[in-house]
Amino acid sequence: MLMNTLPTTDSTRLGISVVTSAWNIERLVGETIRSVVSQKQPGDQYVFVDGASADRTAEIARGFGDQIDVMISEPDDGQYHGIMKGFDHATGDIQGWLNADDILMPWTFSVVREVFDRFPDVDWITGSPSFLSDQGQLTRVYSKLPAYPRQFIANGWFSKTLGGYLQQESMFWRRGLWDKVGGLDLKYALAGDFDLWTKFARHADLVPVDVPLAAFRERPGEQRSSASEDRYQQEVKQICADKPRATAAWRFLANRGTVARSFARLMIRGSSPAIVYNRRTRDWQMTTARRSISRQSLGTLIEEWRLDRLGEE
């Protein structure tokens, strides 16, 4: 079912604040910064927090001059501490953060602004999960529109083996949602974003927008998410310790390997809102329907399985 919601009557442009927390990432940080500042409009803001890098990260950032609205370079207690410092300076109605090796799509600010303006009851959105190679090539876009049942997120079921992780760099939310939950819990060094999503879901639906908004750069072994996987999983387990568990059948399939896990995601369905572009009316519209929680179609899953088998030969 499509619901066409009229734009808000307030003519004031919604401002977008993006925060980047960086440390020793000189090879990639320039591309990240350009992906943000190239699309800023009046009222938008970019906050860059450097944790006293020992390389040229801060120098490269300063080279963008006043395109970066707030520049901080000083020692901190890690990425999440830097992000929290950045949001202390954020003034935008809409917020998000971008890691220093990822990128925004060229249309992201335009789409995000229009969606939040058109749908005043939407507080939290995400784009289609997208991935870059280490060389900056766009290698994958998950184009299947999924369901994100709110209770599943609140329960921590969008995890590695169950529903799959939610892609942080594609997330945008209204400032009031961030303020309501108090931002990141700094006792988590690696899974703070996972914890944040469970808290957001207590107050708002995560609404997928059927277009890529950002891309995650895959650098296996170099990123904290891969180099510290065991510690990350320990933090996820701690966050979920007092939350309801998924059904025994789902947990069984989730631990039977990639094929069984992917099949479970295709079979598990839920109702949740989504935002799609109507090419006939040329505008973004809200749709509600029962969908699987998988972000990949059966055909895509089969093709990835074939590629994995080829890689093993």
Image (cartoon, rainbow, N blue to C red):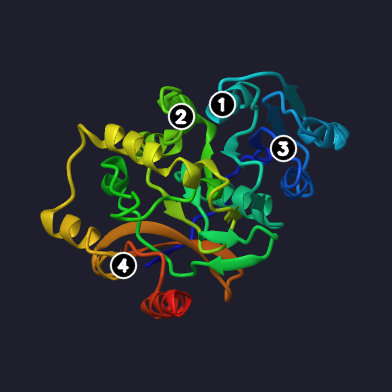
Lower sequence index among marks 2 and 1:
1
Q: Please tell me whether mark 4 or mark 1 is closer to you in this view.
A: 1
Lower sequence index among marks 4 and 1:
1
Image position, residue 290 (x, y; %): 29, 66
Q: CA distance from mark 2 to mark 4?
A: 29 Å
Helix, strand or loop at mark 3: loop
- Mark 4 highlights which residue? 262
Q: Quadrant of residue 79?
A: top right
Q: CA distance from mark 3 to mark 2?
A: 29 Å
- 207 left or right of 36? left
Question: Residue 189 bears which disc, if any?
Answer: 2
Amino acid type at mark 4: Ser
Kindly check if marks 4 and 1 are in contact, taking CB atoms under 8 A apart as contact.
no
- 37 left or right of 79? right
Taking 140 as reference, is 148 above or below it? above
Looking at the rendered image, the quarter that the C terminus falls into is bottom left
- Mark 3 highlights which residue? 44
Taking 256 as reference, is 17 above or below it? above
Kindly check if marks 2 and 1 are in contact, taking CB atoms under 8 A apart as contact.
yes
Kindly check if marks 3 and 1 are in contact, taking CB atoms under 8 A apart as contact.
no
Residue 237 in sight in this render: yes
In front of the other: 5 or 44: 44
Image position, residue 180 (x, y; %): 42, 26
Q: Residue at x 46, y 80 (%)?
A: 310
Q: CA distance from mark 2 to mark 1?
A: 7 Å
- Mark 1 highlights which residue? 78
